[in-house]
Amino acid sequence: HVDFWSSALTCTTFFNSGFLSFVRSKGLMDYHLQVTPDSQLGFRMTVQYGEERYGPARYANCLSCLDQGPPCSIEVGVYGVGPASAGRSCLTNADTKVGQTHEGRFNWFIDGKARPMAVVCPARHSEHLSDMATGELLEFWESVGVLIRTLGISFHEIIVNQGTYRNLAHLHAKIWFAEEEFMEALRARLPQKFPVWEELDALYAVLDKPQPAAV
């Protein structure tokens, strides 16, 4: 599979010299960026834009900023259940955190909706790739590589949504995997988080688990 640890510098160089120049020339703030493995190129980047979108959702506290206020209930923060109606689960956004990279500057999480993916985001609140310095961009992609290597399985795609294409304002990369492989890797390599994933999956089933294409 694509080794994103060794490809991080190439990815960052491409962003600085090519992709961000393209985005700026088009005046783009709203777009969907997809990174997929490519047997000849190593990886391929595709950008979609021009669709009418209405994100991101806004919350009193950012779900990805774990140091800003108390932990947020998954029911309230992910599914939008009113606090008075919540109570099916005690899980919070803090429970989905798996680890950190680069001396705590980047966090990674399992998905709050129990989909077969993991999420990488900067610890400090940042909303756009273009807001990050070159060193931060390099660490961002390196953190994606650390996550993939930790799980030890091939990824299907990496998604970074910007502007109105986002569900959450905080900059984050979604790394998608095959569901069975992801579950096995989570069980074998991160056993302390597998019970959390199972509880998230049970909550997901109760609260109408959507298909990935609809999210």
Image (cartoon, helix red, strand yellow):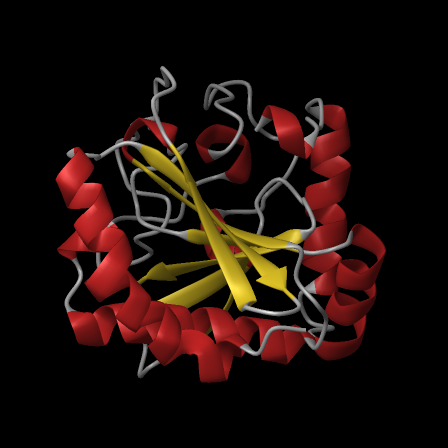
In the visual, does 203 lie left or right of 148? right
Indicate the quadrant where residue 201 lies.
Answer: top right
Front in this rendered view, residue 69 or 122: 122
In the visual, does 87 lie left or right of 146? right
Front in this rendered view, residue 154 or 71: 154
Front in this rendered view, residue 78 or 32: 32
Q: Residue furthest front?
A: 40
| Residue at image location 27% in from the left, 68% down from the top | 137
Front in this rendered view, residue 67 or 116: 116
Quarter of the figure with the N terminus: bottom right
| Residue at image location 73% in from the left, 67% down from the top | 186
Q: Residue 108's spot in the image, x, y percent?
A: 47, 64
In the visual, does 25 lie left or right of 22? left
| Residue at image location 57% in from the left, 44% down from the top | 112
Quarter of the figure with the C terminus: top right
- Do we see residue 10 in this rendering? yes
| Residue at image location 40% in from the left, 76% down from the top | 8
All told, the count of numbered labels is: 0
Q: Residue 97's spot in the image, x, y percent?
A: 50, 62
In the visual, does 58 lie left or right of 46? left
Q: Classify 89 as above or below 7.
A: above
Q: Residue 31's spot in the image, x, y percent?
A: 34, 35
- Do we see residue 126 in this rendering? no
Q: Residue 17's spot in the image, x, y percent?
A: 21, 64
